[in-house]
Image: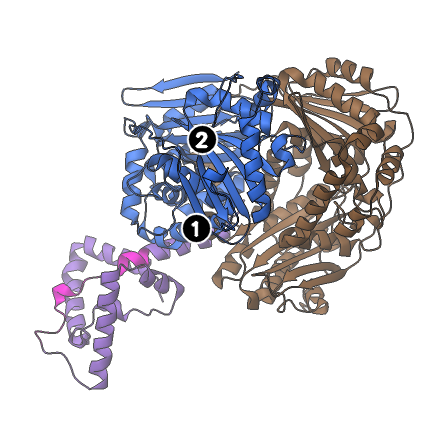
Amino acid sequence: MIRGSAVRSSLKVMTTRRLLSSAVSKFTTLSNGVTVATEANPAASSSTVGVYFGAGSRSEHPYNNGVSALATNLLAGQLQDGILLGSSNSKEVNGIVAQTTNDNVNAAGKLVASIISNASEVAAKADFQSVKNALIAEAAAVESTPQAKILSHLDASAFQGYSLGLPTLGTTESISGLELDDVTRHLQRQINGSNTVIAASGKVDHDALVDAIESSLKVEAGLKPQVKPATFLGSEVRMRDDTLPKAYVSIAVNGEGLNSPGYYLAKVAAAVFGSFDKNTTLAHYTSPKLATIVQEYDIVDKYTHFSTSYSDAGLWGFSSEISNITRVDEFVHFALKEWNRLSISISDAEVARAKAQVKVALAGELNSTTAVANDLGSKLLLVGHRNSLADAFQKIDAITTKDIKAWGQAKVWDNDIVVSGTGQIEALMDYGRNRNEMAMMRW
Amino acid sequence: MASITSIVKTCDFIRSRPVLSRVLIPLSQLFTSFSGYRQMGLKYNDLLMEETPVMQTAIRRLPEDLSYARNYRILTAHQLALTHQLLPADKAVKPEEDDHYLIPYILEAEAEAFEKAELDNIEV
Amino acid sequence: MLSRRAYSSAASALKVAARDSASELTTLSVVVKNAGSKNGAKSGLSHLLSKYTFLNTQSKSALRFARESELLGGAFSSQVTRDALILNTQFLKADLPYYVEALGNVLAGTQFRPHEYVEVVLPAARAEYQAARLDNAYNALEELHAISFRKGLGNPLLYDGTTPISSEEVQQFAQESFKSGNVSVLADGANSEDLLGFVQESLLTQLPAGASESTPVEIFKGKESRIRASGQSVALIGVPIKPADFGKYEVLSAAIGSAILPSANTQLGKIGGASQVYKYQDAGLFVVSVSGTGAQVAQGIKQAKKIVDSVANSELTNAVKSAELALALQSSVVSPADVKVEAAQAPLGDFNYVAIGDVDVLPYASDL
């Protein structure tokens, strides 16, 4: 166990008093196939109830790209009677999320249930044009923010030709072409019993909520629409724009999906290299070796290593911002050489550190009732069940350095990469050079 | 080359032993006065090899007055070397003026470097 | 389940409060009140002090602490607000003693080495300021605080580098502020007996007794400021208010469209604006803001003023629930919600006005 050696001497003994019950998740499946899931958090100051259905941009095609986001935005985006309705749009799940005070949870449950039951009518009553314009503005904002743009195009390039590559919110052109009929048809197709989950978190009484929802919910039973396929293609997309102040580069390999046994391995591997921001006080002292290397010659402003997972596919890599535009290749070189170490010489201490950081990050993500409800909803839809945090921790604790090396040798060493860059990327070298950095000729 | 930290430790050891002190310290003082750098207007710490990361860090951390004084002494020494001259006895650096102004900064920088090397290679 | 205890010994009045939870994560925060941007002889002292935290201490170097902390998986950061300096840590439950000790070291044992000031603190502070300065909404809010409160709450939040500050002055400020009367240790997800025990063993008990006196707040109304800037245009109407009025203005904010409850069907939401009540210890600021292009803001801020002036009592009563939700969403371990909402007329009166951006087309306060 890692909590020894240098740190043990300063640890004191803690009393073993523990809270008796852990966060209890309860699940009920209604007769029409809709699952109602709740996680009680007695200390929450507010509660969230959301209805989630498995659509997302993955269910679209290039000509109606954005219809799922438009549909949820038409259904949500209002403040009603102390209940704040928002939308949650991702590539595979859409949700209408209601936040409310703890005494109002059942009313919120009724509200989201009635919205999803009369989705087409509710969407028709909304101000179509203004919601559409707002979504166009959001999609344009993704394109005009370099950091979001490179990630959006990273997906698009990696999964090119498949619907998983479509931008989550759509493009300004595709949204402009959408009509109310498209939205109605989309909702009718996607909302059925086995494709809908209602998730709640906060001071929630599971049985009372189920009763409240069951009375208002009218969703027909049906089969979950088939998830469209996706495969990874090593490729690159360059959106060079010398008018931007920096170079923004992102490189990734084919990662792990939510259902994959290597899901946590990928997360731990990403945490081995971690994130870096040269403008923080932590920059001089942080553990990853890459951070020390890049600071010697001020090569990069910030970078983040990520492991994003969709249901059966994922991306694992980094995204970065570089002001020192003549050093773009230096940074890519050192980052990819560090990735090589994942397969060869990663140390026990690095893996232990990464495991601890992943655990804290996973627990820290679930820091609001909305985050918990979104997690409940999307995991139930995409994986079919939701592992508790304790379960996840167990799986992470079981990871050894050998496992990480094996994963690196399989998924990172000499694997195809997808490169995405914008800004002043003249110094970002050709695909062949970067692809060759994924392995070393050592003998 | 031994680190300044180890040299300082050795010196502290010598100073703590009366026999060694009585023998080695006068000898060392004789040696430094014959070295001649004081007649070039330099202090001992000006002579230490500065082309290492630790020394560069230590020099960078000098307060302004010490830094300007150091630079002036080095300039003076260059001028003297160029013109093949030495400073007269009253202008030369006196033994009591030859303080080790840079050593604390070097020790701190070395401690940081050693700590970093240890923590970079931590065993779990 | 919130247990509040004042831990007292002969010399200190440190506040320690903890709330246990089922999650595996503990969030431990230390709030040093009267050490925010409103305090200090020079503006920016608090921001610089926030950058000096978690660096070299008497018992542990900055590098060692950072490496050990990352090995445990924990994260730490410090934050400056107008009222207080907040040290945040987040870690797995089992590491509570380590972080309590670390926080004690930060408050009572920071070395304030001069080289750290030059190498770490100043660059980080400068970079944070430069990044914040790019946002016109931030600049507008700072200006609004400056004209509404002048000294104290009106001080800039971050160090802008216009007045040179030495590391000795930052150390002096730390000595004045890190007193046990100012310090509260707040934990979410920790056992309160354990926390008390560890606090007793840490250096937090050795903080000097006493507390900084808070200077009285002066409020100024009817002021106006215009700033030419490129980028987004922002117009703010601000009403400085007393803490007793927070409830009224929260309801008003929820009724017309609050920034905490973003929605398209509220009156302000429809014109691209929002309102918010900034709550501080001794005063507050009710702000109505509109942002966008110069033309949008010019029209929008006039509409916004009309909306605020014409709020009906029925709208206020209907907004009480939304206001409660907004307060619940804003409450956290470091700033628990303790405002009682009430539906009552909350007039703008003599308001303050800031216009930033394309100032040539933005209206004057008298035009609204």
Looking at the image, do the residues carrying marks 2 and 1 touch, with CB atoms under 8 Å apart? no
Palette colour of chain A = brown
Q: Callout 2, which amino acid?
A: Val
Question: Where is A173 relative to C71, above or below?
Answer: below
Chain with colour blue in the figure: C
Label annotation for residue C322:
none
Q: Which residue is mark 1?
A: C124
Q: Secondary structure at mark 2?
A: strand
Res. A266 in view: no
Pick the residue in front: B53 or C122.
Answer: C122
Quadrant, the N terminus of chain B: bottom left
Give the Cα distance between marks 2 and 1. Answer: 33 Å
Q: What chain letter is assigned to the residue under label 2?
A: C
Q: Position of residue B66 (x, y in %)?
A: 23, 62
Chain with colour purple in the figure: B
Q: What chain letter is assigned to the residue under label 1?
A: C
Q: Callout 1, which amino acid?
A: Ala
Q: How is the image coloured?
A: by chain
Q: Secondary structure at mark 1?
A: helix
Q: Which residue is mark 2?
A: C239
Pick the residue in front: A382 or A171.
Answer: A171
Question: Where is C232 relative to A202, above or below?
Answer: below
The segment highlighted magenta reads B89-107
Tell me if mark 1 has few (under 14), some (14-19) or many (20+) residues whose alpha carbon lies within 10 angstroms of its own: many
Q: Position of residue A324 (x, y in %)?
A: 53, 64
